[in-house]
Image (cartoon, grey):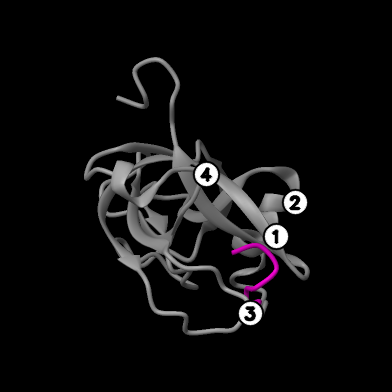
């Protein structure tokens, strides 16, 4: 899907997430008081209501919770089929991204499959997508 994405609007609250890929890192806001990761970003922690937030790079490793294979060509220039997945990151239960899976055939994707982030540039933003994590033992 490279080159076919509509870039999101950058704000002070989300810029770290959308531009971290320029450095090859996936970044989230995390509460400095309770350690809870916030996604989507929020000006206060949803767990403890603290406003002490920090930008933190995560491992970029996760696993597929669920996915669907899209066969409908919704936009010109977007090759089908492509996979839309819900990926949960290893850093925190519930820290999830709706994303695309790349680098594998749709028929090879499995629930719980370990994945690793990579980025697709769309203008000044870097969209996190995931590919199978083929390292020995995955991420478990």
Residue under label 3:
6
Contact (CB < 8 A) between labels 4 and 1?
no
Q: Would residue 8 appear left or right of 83 to someone viewing this image?
A: right
Q: Answer few, some or many: residues within 10 Å of disc 3's Cα (few below 14, many 20 plus, some between 14 and 19).
A: few
**In-image side of 101 versus 77 (left or right):** left
Q: On the rendered image, what quadrant is the C terminus found in? A: top left
Alpha carbon separation for disc pair 4 and 1? 14 Å
Give the image location of residue 10, x and y in percent.
67, 77
Would residue 36 be counted in the magenta stretch? Answer: no
Where is residue 58? Give x, y as percent.
51, 41
**What residue is at 27 percent from the left and 54 percent from the top?**
94
What secondary structure is marked by label 1?
helix
Q: Position of residue 109 (x, y in %)?
A: 31, 44
Whether tag 2 and tag 1 are in contact, CB under 8 A, the answer is yes
Which residue in the structure is indicated by mark 4? 117
Magenta run includes residue 4: yes
**Real-space CA distance between mark 1 and mark 3, rounded to the nearest whole angstrom:** 15 Å
Q: Which mark is residue 19?
A: 1
User: What residue do we see at 65% from left, 82% from top?
Assistant: 9
- Magenta-drawn segment: 1-7
Q: Please name the residue shown 66% across and 76% down the image.
A: 7
Labels 3, 2: front one: 3
Residue 33 vs 85, above or below: the answer is above
Q: Quadrant of residue 76?
A: bottom right
| In the image, residue 98 above or below residue 8 | above
Residue lying furthest top: 136
Crowd tier of the residue under label 1, counting other residues whose Cα lies within 10 Å: few below 14, some 14–19, many 20 or above = many
């Amino acid at each position: 899907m490279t080159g076919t994405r509509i870039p999101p609007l950058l704000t002070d609250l989300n810029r770290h997430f959308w531009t971290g890929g320029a450095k090859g890192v996936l970044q989230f806001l995390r509460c400095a008081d309770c350690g809870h990761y916030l996604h989507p970003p929020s000006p206060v922690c949803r767990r403890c209501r603290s406003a002490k937030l920090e930008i933190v790079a995560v491992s970029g490793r996760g696993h597929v919770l669920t996915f669907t294979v899209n066969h409908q060509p919704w936009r010109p220039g977007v090759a089908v089929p492509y996979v839309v997945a819900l990926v949960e990151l290893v850093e925190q239960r519930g820290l999830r991204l709706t994303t695309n899976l790349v680098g594998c055939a749709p028929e090879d994707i499995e629930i719980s499959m370990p994945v690793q982030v990579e980025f697709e540039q769309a203008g000044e933003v870097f969209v996190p997508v995931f590919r199978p994590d083929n390292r020995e033992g995955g991420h478990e």
